[in-house]
Image (cartoon, rainbow, N blue to C red):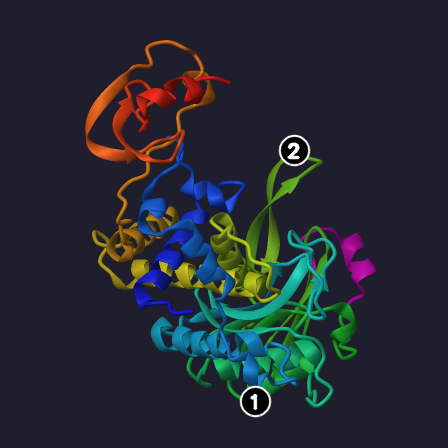
Amino acid sequence: LNVIKDELLVVFGGMLMSGYAKYPNKRMYWSRQDDVPKLLSESMRCNRFEQILRFLHLNDNAILDPNDRLYKLKPILDALNKSFIQHGGIDEKLSVDESMIPYYGKHYAKQYIKGKPIRFGFKNWAICSSSGYLYAFEIYSGKDPSRETKFGLGGDIVIRLLEKAEIPSDSGHKIFIDNFFTSVPLVRYLAKEKYCTTGTVRSDRTEQCPLKNPRDMKSEGRGSYDFRASEDVMLVRWVDNSVVTAVTNFENLSVGMASRWSREKRAKVQVPQPTVFSSYNKGMGGVDLMDQNVAVYRTRMRQRKWWWPIFVYLFDVCVSNAWILNKKLLPKEDCIGQLLKFRRNLALTLLKKHGKQSSQGKIKPSPLQDIRFDNQNHWPQENETQRRCAHCKKKTTFVCSKCDIGLHPKCFRGYHSQ
C-alpha cells in the first residue's frame, strides 16, 4: 500500500479527534447529516482512512522473531523509550508503578487484576515524574525463564526502568515505589548504588525487622507509629485507616501532623504522621496522573489486531507527554493549559494542514425522511452547475429547492414518494 506522510498525519488527526468527538461507529465521522462535523470527511475519504488503518504495521512480519512476544511493536517501543528520555528532562521526584491497557480479546500476555478500574488488559510497568510525564516503560509479556532474577519480578523491574530512563545515581533524584515492587534488599541495593528511594512494603517483606505487631498497633489508635533503623535503611510502621509500613534509605524520622476525619467527633482532627508517608504521598502519584490524562480523552477507533490497544495507548501517552512539555517549556502566555484544548489544536492542525479536499467537492447531506416525504414546497429549480441526481444517479442541472439536492424533474415523484 502506497501511503504518503500527509495521509498518515491525517489518520493521526482523526485518531486525536475520536478522543473528544465520540461516535458509536467510526463511519459516522463521514456522515452527511448536519449534526456531524465535516472536517475529517473533507480531509480524507472514509475508504482510504479505513484502508490505511487495515494495512498499518509497525514491524516486518517477514522476519518475525518467535522469541519476542512483542515483536510487532518492537520498533515503536524502542523509539518511544529513547524519545521520552531525550526530550523529557528528569524531574526530582520519580515514581514506579503499573498501568493497565484495556484489552478484552484473547492473548497470552493479557492480565486480570481484581479491584482495578481496568481489570482486563496488558500490564505496563512505568516510571513517571510527579507531573505525569512518562520517561520509560516496559510492556509485560509474561515470565521470561531465561532472565535471572535478583530481587523478584517487582524489584528487577525497578532496576530495569532506572537503566532505561538513564537516571544517574547520586544526583538527588527521589524514587518512590509501590509495595508490589518494594523489598528491604532492593532498597539496600539502591542505597549502595546511591539512589534515594522510599516505598511502602508489605508486612511479610520486612526481613524480620522487630517492629511492633500490626494488631497491637491498631489497638493503640490512629497516629501511633514505630520505627527501626540501620546504617543504610529505616523502616517505619504507622496506623492510619489501616496499618502501613514504609522503608526508606534517605529520609530521617521526623513527625508532622495530618488532617483526618473522625467518625466519633464528626469533624476533622490532627493526627501524628511520620513525614516519610507525607513525602511518599506527594511523590508517588505520577503514573496514576498519566493514566488519568490517557483515560479522559482515550482514542476510540478500534481495529482487529491484538497490538492495536497498546499502540493507541502509547499514542495517547505521546499526547500527554507533549502537553506536559508544552506547559513546562513555553511561557505561560504561550502554553496551552488544558489537555482538551491542546488535543483539539493538534487534531485541527493535522487535518487542516495535511488533509486534501476531494476533487468532487463537498458532498451535500441527504435530507431527513420527514422533510423528503412531507409533500410540501418541493419545486424543481435550475442550478448553474451540474449535480448528481439523487434518484437516477445521472448528472443534472436541476435541484430540489427544499431538499437542496440534484434531482431531474422527471425523478421528483419517484424520489419524494415512500
Q: What stretch is highlighted in magenta?
A: 212-225
How far from the left and from the top, in percent, is residue 86?
36, 77
Task: Measure how far apart labels 1 and 2 are at the Cα level.
Answer: 47 Å
When the figure is inspected, residue 222 is found, relative to residue 143, above or below; the finding is above
The foreground one among 299 and 149 is 299
Q: Is residue 379 above or below residue 52?
A: above
- Numbered circle sitting on residue 266: 2
Q: Which mark is residue 192?
A: 1
Observer-nearest residue: 373 or 104?
373
Give the tally of numbered discs. Answer: 2
| Residue under the point 72% across and 70% down | 108
Residue 218 included in the magenta stretch of the image: yes
Q: Residue at 66% of width from left, 40% of height from top?
A: 262
Q: Is mark 1 on a helix, strand or loop?
A: helix
* Mark closer to the observer (1, 2): 1
Mark 1 or 2 closer to N-term?
A: 1
The question of residue 172 being in magenta is answered with: no
In the rendered image, residue 230, in percent from the top left (x then y), is placed at 65, 83
Q: Looking at the picture, how far across and down is residue 133, in whole percent?
A: 43, 65
The amino acid on which the numbered mark 2 sits, given as a three-letter code, is: Arg
Q: Is residue 142 visible?
A: yes
